Each structure stands twice: as C-alpha cells, then as structure tokens.
Image: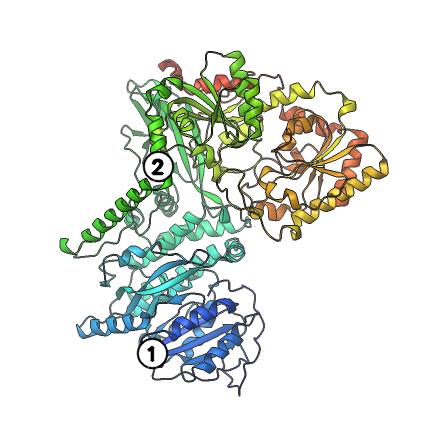
C-alpha cells in the first residue's frame, strides 16, 4: 500500500448488506465484511488499501486467475479510510466470491495498523501481505505451496518464503529484473539459513510468506508508530528472531509484479521531506529490533545488521538525488538524527559495513557509516585522479567533524604545500555527514603526509565499487552460477551485434571511420572547439570564439552548431569555421580537439563523445552566474575549467561545499558574454532604452527531460491552469494596463527561458505584449534596450546588473520552486544580495516596475552591483583564454610544490 497519509482520516462508506461490527483497539466503530472468508484456506492474503481504486481490477484479476484456486485463499482487504471508491470496488469483488473475500474498514491509521487488523482475521497456514496496486503471477500460490511442502517433506521446513519482485513499469508495460535484491534469485531455488548466509536478507512483507502459527504464538504485529518506512523490515526481523531457525526459502518462479506507478511523484516528494522517515526508522524501528535481539539471542545477528545497512545505504543513495536534496528539513532534526545514527551503528560490526555488497554502494558511503560509528577520525588516504598534463596527482581521504591537521613534506623533510585543496561535503539527508578532502601534489616527486602527527608514506589506489552479489555458505563450485553468467554474456553480445546492424549502429560505424581518418586528424589537430547549445549560438562560447579568432589566429578554432540553426547562416556570413553538430565531422573534431569550451553542460555537450575517444580539456563557460547549489547536476561531469564571475560565486564553489570542484578547476574570470554585453550597451543612448522586459526562468516540474535535441521537450496539457502561467499572465496584463495609462510608449517584451519554449504558442499574453523566443531574438539586444528587467530566479539579473539595468524580482512560488528545481538555496540571498526589490504579488511587482522607471536604480542596489562586479574591464575573454591555456600547462616543480593563490590578482586567474 503506497501513499498512506500521516494524518488520520474518516470512516469509509458503509458496505451493502447486513453489517457485522469488527472491533479493534483504539478505533471504533468499523464496518464489516460481507462474505466472511473461509477458515479452511491454506493462505491468508492481507492487503491494506488506501485510494487504490484504479489499480484494484488488475490485482483482483490476478487473484481470480490463481491456478491453485480461490478456495485455497482467504483474501482480507482492509480499507484504511480511503477517500475514493476503493472500498466499494472491493465490496463488489467480495460479493463475487462469497466465502473467500473479506472487506474490513477502519479509520485511517497507516499501513501497519491495516495489516494488523487483517491479521486478527487471518486463519491460514501461511499469511502474506501483497499491495493491492501490484499483480501476482497466475502460478504464484501454487509455486509457494508446492515448494514449501516439498521442503518440509525433505526435513527442511522454512520459517519464511521469499518470492521474486519484478519491476513492472506502468507507463511502458515493461517488466524488468532490476530490483536491488534480484540477484538472490539468479541461483535458482534456494533454502538458506540466514544465520549462516546473512547476505540473503528478505526485507519485504509484500513478497514474503509467514507462518501464522509463529505469529500467533508470539503475538507479532507490525509497528503502528512507523508510518513511512521500515515497518516491513521490523516485522520480518522480529519474526525471524523468534523462529527456531531463520530459514528462508527463495523461489524465483513465484513472480510478484511490483508496479512502478506513474502517479508516484507527489506522494514520494511529500514523504521524502518528512523527518519521521529518517528519525523514526532508527528511534522506533531499529531500536525495537535491537532490544528484542539482545533479549532473545543476546546479540544482533549479522543478517539483522544487513537489514539495517540495506536501509541506511538506500538513505545514503537517495540523499544524492533531487528529491532529498531539494527537501527542506528542520534544523533541530539533525542533532537527533546524528546521535541516533551513531547509537545504532554501535550494534553493527565494522566489517559488516565494509563488506556489505547486497547492492552497489559507493565506497565513501561505507566510510561515512564507519566514521559515523566511530564518531571521529579519518579514513585511509588514497591516491586519486591524475592530471599528467599539469604534472599533478591527488590524495583523497574522508573525515568527520574537524579536519585533521595536515603536514606535507618531501622525503628529506622539506615542508611543502598542496598546489590545490578542496573540502567537499558528502551528504546524508540534506547535510554533510562526512567531508572529502582532496590535495593536489606533484606527480614526479615522493611526498609524505602527516595527519594529526601520524605519518603516512604509502597511498593505495582508491577502491572500486564491487558488483552486488549474494554469497551462500558452504556452496560448492558446481553450485556457483557460472552457466547463468555465461548466458548473460551471450545475451549482451547478441544485443551488441543487433545494435551494430541497426540504424544507430551504422551511425556509430560512420562516426568511428571519421575519427580514424588521417585527413580529419590533420584538419582538427589540437583544435579548440566552441559550442553554446547544439541548436543555437549567441552566448559566451560564440563571443570567446570570435575573440580567439581575432587575437590568436594561430589557434585551430572551430564553432559547433546544427546546420539547420539560424545561427549557422549568420555565423557563416561572418566567416566562421563551422561544424554541424552530430555529424561524423563533429565527432572527428572532438576526438582530435585539445579544448572544448561551452556555455552549457547538458549531456548534448558533456556526453556527446564516448569517453574512450576523449582527450580534450572541457571548459564550462557557464550560461549564468551560479547563485545556489546545483552540485547534484554538475558534480558527475568532468570539468577541467569552471568559469565564475563574482568573488562570492568563486568562494562558494571552491570553499567547503557540496561542489567537488576546487581552485584547481574553478577560476574567476567573468563570462565572455559580459564583454560583448557591456560593449554593446555603452553604444545605446538612454532615450533608446524603452523596453520593459519580463524574463522568467523555467520550472523543472513543467517540462520533461530533453529529447532528440536540447530544445526538444514536452509540456503539460494543463499548463494554462498552472500558477506559473496564471501569475505571469496576470503580471503582463497589469504592466500593460499601467503603461497604457501612463502613455509612455514603452513596449513590454515577454521572453521566458528556452526550456519553456514549448509553451510560447499558448501562453496567455495581452495583445500589447510582444512574445520573444531565444531562437528568434538576440537576448543581449533586448537587454541593452531595456529600461527595467523583471525576472524571478533567473541569473539573467546578473546580466542586467552588469550594465546597471534596474531589476525587479517576482517570486510568487519560492517554496515550490526550490522544492522541485535543480537549484538549492546557496550563498545568494535575493533580499540581501539581489539587485532590486523582491515581490510576491502582481500588484507589488507592478508598483516596483513603476518606481524603477521613474527613479532609476536606488543607491543600495547600485552599491551591491559594485561589490559583486568590482572589475568590469572588458577583458573576460582574455582571462578565460589564459585559464584554458593553463589547464594544459605543466609548471616547474618549484611552482608545483607551492600553494596556488586562492585569491586572484586583478586580471589573473584565481589559482
């Protein structure tokens, strides 16, 4: 059952027929179940239901098709205060199958309370708890019953049966063996004593079968105080602790189809941000299991430790995703959470943490739990990435709490300094749990490191993430799944051959032939390639390209854009050397290029060429000034040079932060497009600055992922009804009415972010407003003719500030924006650091625009601009060129033994 709300709900509607009141502690009254199920059934099937009306037909059909026959199933459907017609649909199903189906109703209390009510009525030999939005294979119960009986006949009676969870993707209809624990079933049927083979955990009650006799004997119930996570694992652990032996039978042929619902986003988002999901799991769930384990067996068994580690590694993994990273948690949650994590890890063996391999886990996550268990200290120091062109290698270690005192020396005792250093926070539920320290030192001299006065002379290579596996105790070589592995290799080879014969495969062949061409190798030798978007130019990459062509004609410079882009013709007329994006020529250019510079870091740029062909240095010129945390998007990318434009931006990224980039990669140069913007603005008379420009940024929840090109995105059918559309439409209408009344003759231009371009033709705008597209209009030409800029969160405000253009921020949806957007709040505060007033309503924004038009820019905002851009000298392109050259320059050993300057001198790069 998914999406059970935390708050209590009301009763469902009474079911037809004469009611039989069912009592339950703390909840009264509830209505009955007509057609009370048979007490002679072998299997009790308890399914809690909450607002699953649309999924019940599939689930009920899978029950009706069971080859074992409905008469062997006692189906107990517990409606947990649904607000839709779930109960009514269930009642109709019960009336079709008198004697087999019971429907119970109760006020909303959560999944655990619904299962517990069902357990009160369960009479079968075995009980299981499938969710009613999933589907069971037609032989599901026959396989379980037959296998369990056969095992008992052989004298190995399982305490529990585990069936195979298959991921059923609702939208595509595809079924995949992609569950994290699916490898348990790739060995065929197994009966496992998990005391001996503790890797073989079964954390799910949905796909587990439990003996009712054991549940009744010990009065086992699901923990009703756990509402969001771990109630399954808690029940399973406490059940197996009471079994004579924790023997679990794994049945790959009993297939449970786990529906991946297309409507999950809002439910997942709301539960993700609930502190109980993280605190209660430990404080209630794990603590309860520890207490019972110590009471019953005097220790926490290794399989129970693995259950907890499985849960916590999932939390660590999800903490790297947008859902958790963008959630807002109360500050007072963290002291309690850190204390609980440290406390519960005292019951987990260190070697269990390091040896955990039930799913792929980044090694730093193991070290995070290890350090959290210890409460202080640091890890092994590893040898990390190497930059041979610059003569540097890295040392990497992780620490918790305070960074150790570092001392670097040569073997003769001479003290040296790291050329570059970086502290990156590694997060657990939105905050750094540990820190990763990276030191860049020369690669051609022996260096010793002391941490807190402990000398370290050898640095092993960083560990790799091991493949997930399930080891079975006492398994002979013949039992190892060699044949299965061989079959998988053959399947992969067959798929590879099929791809080669496909249209895409032919394209790959043409690409490889172009890369291998000697003619193209000479043509593009040591090339500097520049690209803004795959389908558009007119940003920093184009500005830098023209500067390089003028000031360094010796550079083999090329610009990349699609042939069908309007910018192709424009740049061709000016004499640009162009390469068509995505063609064999394009791949040959990248394969032989020395540098690639782009104002964007989307996958169309960063992943255009397979890594095996990449040897160029990638420069991220940026499309705008970074105001917050977009490290989750940028960290996975390989960026050799990272351009910044303000001191605050530079210090935020390079200092202790979630960004992995430090002073080695990040430079303070200013964006090349600022040079062009400033130059063009200085040539426009004030009398010609007569535009009111509205430039909102995009919303992640309003567009899909990119398609065939960077401009190819799908939109929402109901876009016109969204707050984004209605608020900006109202603002445009208000500004139009104001200017009509004033009779100023100013024009209003509406220009949303390119990612919102899919909505341009249906945006509700007044006739007095001109709608401009980035595809058809020059944004810089619009800005230099503007009298005021209205934006929301767009970094376009920095462009406006650079040319002293008044700014108004319209932020009607601040909370929703940060909850669902790529960017997290960072160093920049719109109220304290912004270049204009922050307005939440249309009337306030309209008045702010009027004030800006009448009085210009207030002195406070002018002061902020001067502090943000202390140097506006038109030399950004020059500084970026020098920084790009530096990325491929090997400095002398004497220089590499010294720390690079952390604060840039004017006109120089930062490091």
Mark 2: which secondary structure? helix
Question: Which image quadrant is residue 845 in?
Answer: top right
61 up-or-down from 739: above or below: below
Dot 1, how many residues are within 10 Å of its Cα: few (below 14), some (14-19), or many (20+)?
Answer: some
Taking depth in this image into account, of 518 and 98 the one nearest to the observer is 518
Residue 855, x across and y down, in percent: 80, 30
Which residue position holds label 2?
A: 506
Q: Is residue 182 left or right of residue 258?
A: left
Write down the quadrant of residue 759 in the picture: top right
Q: Which residue is mark 1?
A: 69
Specify the quadrant of the image occupied by residue 772: top right
Q: Of marks 1 and 2, which one's residue comes earlier in the chain?
A: 1
556 and 808: which one is in front? 556
Residue 674, position as x, y percentages in the image = 61, 23
Count of numbered badges drawn on the protein: 2
The answer for how far apart the CA atoms under marks 1 and 2 are is 52 Å
* Residue 57 shows up from this direction: yes
Q: Assign a secondary structure to mark 1.
A: loop
Question: Quick check: 588 above or below 224?
Answer: above
Q: How far from the left and from the top, in percent, is residue 588?
A: 39, 26
Residue 111 vertical placement versus 472 (above, below)? below
Which mark is nearer the camera, 1 or 2?
Answer: 2
């Amino acid at each position: 059952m998914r999406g059970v709300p935390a708050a209590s709900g009301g009763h469902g509607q009474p079911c037809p027929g004469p009611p039989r009141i069912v009592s339950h502690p703390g909840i009264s009254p509830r209505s009955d179940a007509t057609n009370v199920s048979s007490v002679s059934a072998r299997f009790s099937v308890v399914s809690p239901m909450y607002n699953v009306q649309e999924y019940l037909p599939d689930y009920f059909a899978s029950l009706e098709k069971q080859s074992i026959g409905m008469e062997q199933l006692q189906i107990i459907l517990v409606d947990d205060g649904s607000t839709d017609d779930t109960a009514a649909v269930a009642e109709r199903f019960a009336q079709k199958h008198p004697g087999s189906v019971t429907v119970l109703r109760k006020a909303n209390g959560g999944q655990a309370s619904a299962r517990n009510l069902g357990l009160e009525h369960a009479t079968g030999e075995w009980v299981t708890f499938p969710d009613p939005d999933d589907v069971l294979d037609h032989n599901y119960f026959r396989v379980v019953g037959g296998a369990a009986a056969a095992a008992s006949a052989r004298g190995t009676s399982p305490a529990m049966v585990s069936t195979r969870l298959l991921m059923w993707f609702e939208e595509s209809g595809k079924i995949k063996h992609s569950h994290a624990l699916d490898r348990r079933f790739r060995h065929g049927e197994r009966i496992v004593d998990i005391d001996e083979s503790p890797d073989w955990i079964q954390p799910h009650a949905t796909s587990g079968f439990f003996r009712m006799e054991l549940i009744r004997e010990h009065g086992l119930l699901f923990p009703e105080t756990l509402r969001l996570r771990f109630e399954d694992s808690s029940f399973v652990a406490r059940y197996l602790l009471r079994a004579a032996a924790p023997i679990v039978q794994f049945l790959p042929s009993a297939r449970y189809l786990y529906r991946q619902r297309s409507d999950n986003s809002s439910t997942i988002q709301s539960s993700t941000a609930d502190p109980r999901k993280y605190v209660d799991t430990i404080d209630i769930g794990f603590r309860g299991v520890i207490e019972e384990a110590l009471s019953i067996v005097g220790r926490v068994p290794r399989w129970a430790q693995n259950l907890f580690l499985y849960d916590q590694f999932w939390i660590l993994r999800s903490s790297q995703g947008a859902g958790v990273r963008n959630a807002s948690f109360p500050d007072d949650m963290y002291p309690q959470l850190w204390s609980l994590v440290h406390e519960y890890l005292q019951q987990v063996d260190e070697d269990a943490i390091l040896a955990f391999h039930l799913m792929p886990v980044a090694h730093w996550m193991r070290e995070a739990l290890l350090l959290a268990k210890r409460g202080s200290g640091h890890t092994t120091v590893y040898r990390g990435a190497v930059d041979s062109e610059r003569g540097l290698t890295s040392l990497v270690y992780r620490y918790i709490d305070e960074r150790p005192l570092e001392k670097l020396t040569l073997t003769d005792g001479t003290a040296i300094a790291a050329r570059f250093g970086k502290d990156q926070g590694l997060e657990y539920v939105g905050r750094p749990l540990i820190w990763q320290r990276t030191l860049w030192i020369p690669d051609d001299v022996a260096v010793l490191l002391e941490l807190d006065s402990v000398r370290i002379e050898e640095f092993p290579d960083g560990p790799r993430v091991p493949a997930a596996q399930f080891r079975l105790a006492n398994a002979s070589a013949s039992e190892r799944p060699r044949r299965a592995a061989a079959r998988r290799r053959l399947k992969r080879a067959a798929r590879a051959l099929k791809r080669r014969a496909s249209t895409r495969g032919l394209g790959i062949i043409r690409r490889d032939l172009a890369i291998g061409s000697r003619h193209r190798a000479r043509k593009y030798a040591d090339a500097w390639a520049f690209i803004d978007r795959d389908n558009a130019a007119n940003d920093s990459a184009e500005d830098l390209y023209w500067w390089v062509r003028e000031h360094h004609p010796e550079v083999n410079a090329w610009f990349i854009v699609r042939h069908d882009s309007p910018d192709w013709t424009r740049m061709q007329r000016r004499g640009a050397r162009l390469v068509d994006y995505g063609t064999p020529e394009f791949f040959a250019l990248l394969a032989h290029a020395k540098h690639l510079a782009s104002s964007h870091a989307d996958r169309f740029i960063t992943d255009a060429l397979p890594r095996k062909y990449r040897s160029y240095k990638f420069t991220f010129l940026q499309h705008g000034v970074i105001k917050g945390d977009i490290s989750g998007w940028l960290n996975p990318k390989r960026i050799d040079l990272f351009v910044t434009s303000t001191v605050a931006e530079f210090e935020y990224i390079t200092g202790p932060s979630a960004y992995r980039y430090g002073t080695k990669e990040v430079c303070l140069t200013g964006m090349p497009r600022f040079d062009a913007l400033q130059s063009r603005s200085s040539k426009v008379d004030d009398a010609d600055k007569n535009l009111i420009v509205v430039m909102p940024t995009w919303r992640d929840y309003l567009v899909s992922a990119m398609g065939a090109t960077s401009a190819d995105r799908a939109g929402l059918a109901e876009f016109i009804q969204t707050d984004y559309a209605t608020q900006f439409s109202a603002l445009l209408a208000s500004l139009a009415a104001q200017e009509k009344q004033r009779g100023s003759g100013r024009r209003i231009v509406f220009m949303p972010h390119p990612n919102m371009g899919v909505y341009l033709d249906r945006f509700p705008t007044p006739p007095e407003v001109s709608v401009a597209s980035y595809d058809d209009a020059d944004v810089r030409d619009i800005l230099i003719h503007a009298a005021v800029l209205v934006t929301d969160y767009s970094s376009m405000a920095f462009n406006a500030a650079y040319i002293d253009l008044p700014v108004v921020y319209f932020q009607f949806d601040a909370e929703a924006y940060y909850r669902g957007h790529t960017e997290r709040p960072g160093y920049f505060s719109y109220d304290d650091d912004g270049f204009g007033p922050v307005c939440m309503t249309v009337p306030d924004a309209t008045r702010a625009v009027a004030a800006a038009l009448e009085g210009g820019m207030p002195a406070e905002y002018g002061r902020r601009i001067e502090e943000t851009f202390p140097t506006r000298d038109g030399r950004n392109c020059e500084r970026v060129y020098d920084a790009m050259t530096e990325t491929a320059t090997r400095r002398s050993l004497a220089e590499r033994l010294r720390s690079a300057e952390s604060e840039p001198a004017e006109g120089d790069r930062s490091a």
